[in-house]
Image (tube, grey):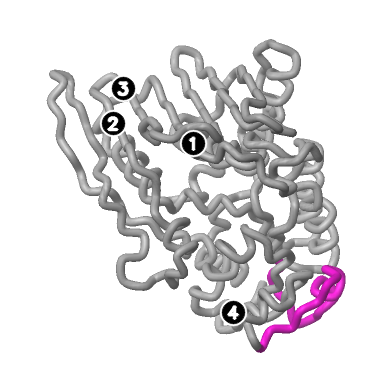
Amino acid sequence: MTPASHTLTVGLLGYGYAGATFHAPLIRAVEGLELDRFASRSRDKVLERFPEATIHEDSSAVLGDPAVDLVVIATPNDTHFPLAEAALRAGKHVVVDKPFTLDLAEARALIALAEKTGRQLTVFHNRRWDSDFRSVHKAIDAGLVGDPTHLEIHFDRFRPQVRDRWREGDGPGAGVWFDLGPHLVDHALLLMGLPDWVTASLALQRRGARSADWAHVVLEFEDRRAILHASMLVAGGVPRFIVHGTGGTALKHGMDVQESQLLAGMTPGAPGWGEDPDPLVLYDAEGHASRLPAEHGDQREFYRLVAEAVRGRDANPVPPIQSLAVMAVIEAAERSAAEGCSVELPLTDAERAAWVASRAYGFTP
């Protein structure tokens, strides 16, 4: 356990899109976290925003630094497992960007290692603190749609040109399902629970696509269903969230604004941070519509809670068993799409029980 008054030194591995856009500014905005160790080949880019930083090209230098308390892994997906394993063995607390790993076996191995070393291990499911998800979560919790029977979540973009980057390549962990799928799955599990079966279709739709850029996944829960959809060819779009229930319907059209604010250079916590002008629309049993102001989004809360967990003052905001369940759905969907069949969720009875128990101490919006 780290002393409660101790400022935690953070080492960030990777300073590409995720590291520069999300992790670095969010960490910097949380009191009690000090980000000044980096492993990146983009030295000049780091120094523009962190002129006093210590920068290494090799991650081993950060992992071997005794001053580093928390290691954040924001590197390509196929490096998540080896880097997280090395960080845990070096005695560091670890945050891994999504997806947790490439498969369920790697996720299980990291969780076992974290338990053995007594270190905190968590996955950057930052969109739990998005305005759109928080608004829908609150509405369901308040019973505004009755018992939810149909959930539909979209994460669509309009990017018709395939870019030359690893996320859109043909290597391990590339493609829209590994990129956006973890967010969709994490939200669905928090709102609906663990599914019994997973049925998926993945496709390459853009000219020159090297990995799946369209994903449609159905989660089956006895008589309930959740539809998860991601595409790179949606210009107008559909509602971000649709929830049908025994008491009505909830629609959230617009997405959370924090990513666009970060890209525009806004400092997390500045006036207007996370303010979403798009309301949640509710339809009652008679079809009458009402509008509720969207909840504020604030992804800083992820790192604030990680710091509290490392200090022993609060629970891990994303318990590892919840990230394991996300990987179980990701893997089941990959298999379903490849084999053209529905796949049972590949979790053991013990893992299912642990997931249910985690709901008592995990995420709260």
* SS label for mark 4: helix
Q: Give the residue pinned by disc 2.
A: 250
Spatial CA distance of label 1 from label 4 is 30 Å
Specify whether residue 64 is painted magenta.
yes
Mark closest to the chain's N terminus, 1 or 4: 4
Q: Give the residue pinned by disc 3.
A: 245
Mark closest to the chain's N terminus, 3 or 2: 3
Q: Which of 170 and 247 lies nearest the eye of the viewer?
A: 170
Are the residues tagged 1 and 4 within 8 Å (C-beta)? Answer: no
Span highlighted in magenta in the image? 52-71
Question: Which picture quadrant has residue 71?
Answer: bottom right
Q: Amino acid at mark 4?
A: Arg
Q: Give the residue pinned by disc 4.
A: 49
Q: Viewer-nearest of labels 3 and 4?
A: 4
**Residue drawn 47% across and 56% down?**
259
Say which quadrant the N terminus sits in.
Answer: bottom right
Q: Give the residue pinned by disc 1.
A: 156
Q: Amino acid at mark 1?
A: Asp
